[in-house]
Each structure stands twice: as C-alpha cells, then as structure tokens.
Image: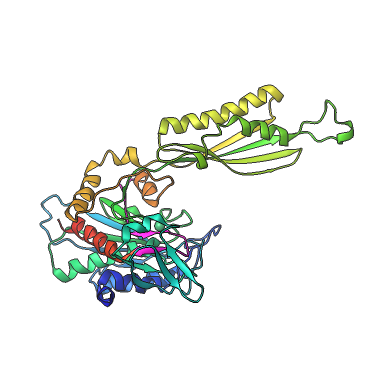
C-alpha cells in the first residue's frame, strides 16, 4: 500500500486535496472564494519547476501553462490541451480532509471507526467494480475533492512523466480553472491565450467514460396575473392566479420530468413556484439532448401560455424562456479526430470506452461552443459532492497514462 504513496499521481492528489478550495453559489466575482488562489499558486510553482516557463495564473485564478513541443513542427501535430477544475462542491464540508488509501476486499469498508461509518456495497452497488483495487476514501465527515483534484493530479503526473522521460512530444497546454461547480469555470477562460487546437476536460466519472454529448438547456419562467377580491363578494370577479397555475402545471406531461426520464429522454422540471391570488411565478427548466425536440419543448411551453390567455383573456400570463447552454455534440461532430484521438489512447491502455450522454452541462460544452473542441475524459472518481466520495488509485494511474499517450503519440 505504501507503494502507492510514492506514485506521482497519488502523492500529487494527496497534496492537492489538502488545500481546501470550495466554491460558492451566488457570488459575483470569479473566483467565488479566495481560498482557490492557494491551489492556483501551488500549481503555477509546480508547472514552473517542470520547466513551463510561461506558467501563470490570472487575477481570476485561472492557471495556464505551455510545454513547447520537441517533435518536428513541420509535421502536423495539433496542440492539445488538458483542463481540470480546482474548486470543489459546496454540498459537503471541504476541511479538514483526512484521506486514506485502502484495499477494497468487497462488501463494507469501515472509513470512520469512532463514528461507525462505512462505505458499503449495498448502498453503492458500483463498488463491486473495485474489489481487489485500492480506494482513496474520506473519514466520512468531508468530501474527498476527487472532483476534480483527481483530474488535476492525473494531468500534472502525465506532464511530469513526459518532462522526466524526455520523450518526444507535441506542444502541450494545460489549464486549471476555478468555479466549475458553480457553473462559471468556462466564463473567463482565455481560449486565444490558451492556444490549443483542441482540448479535453478531465473531470468526474468512472474509468472508461468519454463524453461529448450533453443537454440543451433553457429556463422558462411563467408569470400569472390574477385579480384579488374579498372572498365574500368575489363571485364573477376574482381571478385566482394559484388555480390558473395548477391548470398550467397540469398541461405538462407528467411522464417527462427528471424523476421519470433517463439516458436521452428530455424533460420539463418545475423547480419552484411562488404565489398568491394576485400573482404566481412558476420557474421551470427545460432539457433535451436533441436540438429539434428542445426547440419543440420551448414552443410547447409558449403554446400552453397562449392557450391560457385565450381562455382567461390576453395578459393573464406570459412566459420568459431563456437558453442556458447547448449540446456540444453537433459542434464536436465537425472534429471527429478529437474523439478518435482519445479512443485510441483508451484502447492502448486497454480501457473499454463508455460513451453516454451527460444529463447536464459541462465547461467543456461551453468551450466547444466558443470554438475550442473539448470532450470530457473520466477521472476515476465516485460519489462526487458527497462525504462518501472515493477514487480508485489504480484507475487514476491508468487515466494519467491515457493523458500521457494523447500527448506523446
Ligand atoms: Zn467536476
């Protein structure tokens, strides 16, 4: 087990998770928390020590660096970037993280004797995949930060290996971003300054996952205007916005919600409702992988509102529908070599590729649509955002090997 402590991927990972970097919702500035700068500065120091003389972090905590190529530049070697995020989720405490490396022999793994906490296969069935492997676990009181410091460590270890082995390689770009967990990691990303032809985010998920499809997303707010009158003399006068709201909700298909859909099935999700007789606001989100179906969902919401206005009079309600992000697939299909490159590296490491649609968005999707093709590669992390988060040590080493192959072949 101590052999793992000497492995560069694992030793780096343990060093990075010791730096708390929780990001925070509803903060205007990027980074949303000052403590993310500590890890950014640490990474810049390490990149410089590896000889990346341009390594830098900007005033928002984004870290960038270049390892100039050693192969003949007259041959066509695209510049490939690797990107991971430094922040961790605010859904579980982030300090003090007390990680330990444990051989998983199946069934229950005791992670905190004093509090009697276990990681158990009955609760997390996918643990069965890891029997006989080593897991890095928490003590059950904090998250681990494998999302996404596993990605950071895998990139840094691959880079270190290339520098140490003096193996010929293309020009390499790395970037580490703040505030991914609050949906803002791509916002101030400097694509021209980064200078890659294409890139991969190394983030989340089980060994083998390679993702380049995500939801199209919109938010839809429906505002309903009623008329309040004393209930004792309301006959023929009162218009109760609450009742109209319930009529509107009833028009949406009950089998197209997050709780009734999976894989490529889209949905309408009623996130919140606030209301009185006078006024109700319904906040929906709309999701679909298929662009046409996504547009049809938005049109359906508008039709529902139009129908209500016909019934109760114009101006009774209105919908404000705003696009949030789009599926990267369409754009990615214009760059099939980016997917092929990753698939080939997976094969060379004997890792079967698992491609499944992401039921959410990624920073890579935003970057792809901004012009930097950027699919996502797994990290080996499980139970992200949880006190029961764990990462498989052997898988982290394999994934670092995949990154190394992408950069050196
Ligand atoms: Zn992540």
Asked if residue 169 is among those painted magenta in the image, a careful observer would answer no
Question: In the rendered picture of this protein, how many numbered marks are placed on residues?
Answer: 0
Q: Position of residue 51 (x, y in %)?
A: 22, 71
Q: Is residue 24 left or right of residue 373?
A: right
Report x, y in % for residue 262: 44, 41
Which image quarter: residue 67? bottom left
Residue 407: horizontal and vertical position, in percent?
20, 58
Q: Is residue 187 above or below residue 323?
A: below
Measuring 42% from the left and 70% from the top, which residue is drawn there? 110
In the rendered image, the quadrant that contains the C terminus is bottom left
Picture quadrant of residue 13: bottom left
The residue furthest top is 310
Residue 87 sits in which quadrant? bottom left
Please tell me which residue is depicted at 37% across the width and 59% down the height of the picture.
127
Image spot of residue 182 (x, y percent): 48, 56
Residue 237 visible, this orientation: yes
Using the image, determine if residue 27 lies above or below residue 308. below
Q: Where 340 falls versus 51 (above or below)?
A: above
Magenta span of residues: 371-391
On the question of residue 62 being in view, the answer is no
The foreground one among 254 and 103 is 103
Q: Quadrant of ligand 1?
A: bottom left
Q: Nearer the viewer, residue 86 or 77?
A: 86
In which quadrant of the rendered image does the N terminus lie?
Answer: bottom left
Q: Residue at x 76, y 38 (%)?
A: 277
Instruction: Tell me what residue is drawn at x 35 percent, y 74 percent.
Output: 15
Q: Nearer the viewer, residue 185 or 11?
A: 11
Is 378 within the magenta?
Answer: yes
């Amino acid at each position: 087990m101590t052999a793992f402590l000497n492995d560069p991927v694992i030793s780096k990972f343990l060093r990075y998770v010791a730096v708390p970097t929780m990001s925070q919702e509803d903060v205007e500035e990027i980074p949303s928390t000052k403590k993310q700068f500590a890890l950014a500065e640490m990474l810049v120091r390490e990149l410089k020590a590896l000889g990346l003389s341009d390594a830098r972090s900007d005033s928002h905590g984004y870290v960038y660096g270049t390892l100039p190529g050693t192969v003949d530049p007259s041959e066509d070697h695209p510049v490939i970037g690797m990107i991971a995020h430094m922040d961790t989720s605010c859904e579980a405490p982030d300090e003090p993280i007390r990680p330990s490396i444990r051989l998983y022999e199946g069934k229950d793994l005791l992670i905190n004797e004093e509090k009697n906490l276990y990681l158990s296969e009955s609760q997390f069935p996918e643990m069965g995949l890891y029997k006989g492997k080593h897991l890095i676990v928490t003590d059950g009181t904090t998250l681990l930060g494998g999302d996404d410091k596993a990605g950071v460590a895998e990139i840094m270890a691959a880079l270190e290996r290339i520098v140490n082995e003096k193996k010929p390689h293309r020009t390499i770009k790395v970037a580490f971003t703040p505030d991914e967990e609050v949906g803002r990691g791509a916002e101030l990303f400097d694509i021209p300054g980064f200078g890659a032809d294409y890139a991969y985010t190394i983030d989340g998920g089980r060994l083998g996952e390679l993702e380049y499809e995500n939801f199209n997303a919109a938010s839809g707010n429906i505002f309903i205007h009623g008329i309040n009158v004393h209930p004792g003399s309301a006959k023929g006068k009162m218009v109760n916005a609450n009742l109209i709201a319930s009529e509107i909700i009833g028009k949406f298909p009950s089998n197209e919600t997050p709780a009734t859909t999976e894989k490529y099935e889209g949905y309408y999700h009623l996130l919140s409702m606030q209301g009185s007789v006078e006024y109700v606001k319904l906040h929906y989100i709309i999701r679909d992988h298929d662009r046409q179906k996504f547009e049809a969902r938005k049109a359906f919401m508008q039709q529902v509102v139009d129908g209500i206005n016909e019934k109760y009079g114009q101006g009774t309600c209105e919908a404000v529908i705003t696009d949030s992000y789009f599926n990267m697939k369409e754009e990615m299909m214009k760059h099939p070599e980016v997917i092929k490159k990753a698939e080939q590296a997976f094969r060379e490491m004997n890792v079967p590729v698992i491609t499944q649609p992401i039921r959410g968005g990624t920073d890579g999707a935003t970057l792809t649509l901004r012009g930097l093709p950027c699919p996502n590669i797994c990290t080996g992390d499980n139970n992200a955002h949880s006190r029961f988060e764990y990462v498989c040590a052997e898988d982290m080493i394999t994934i670092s090997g995949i990154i190394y192959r992408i950069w050196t072949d």
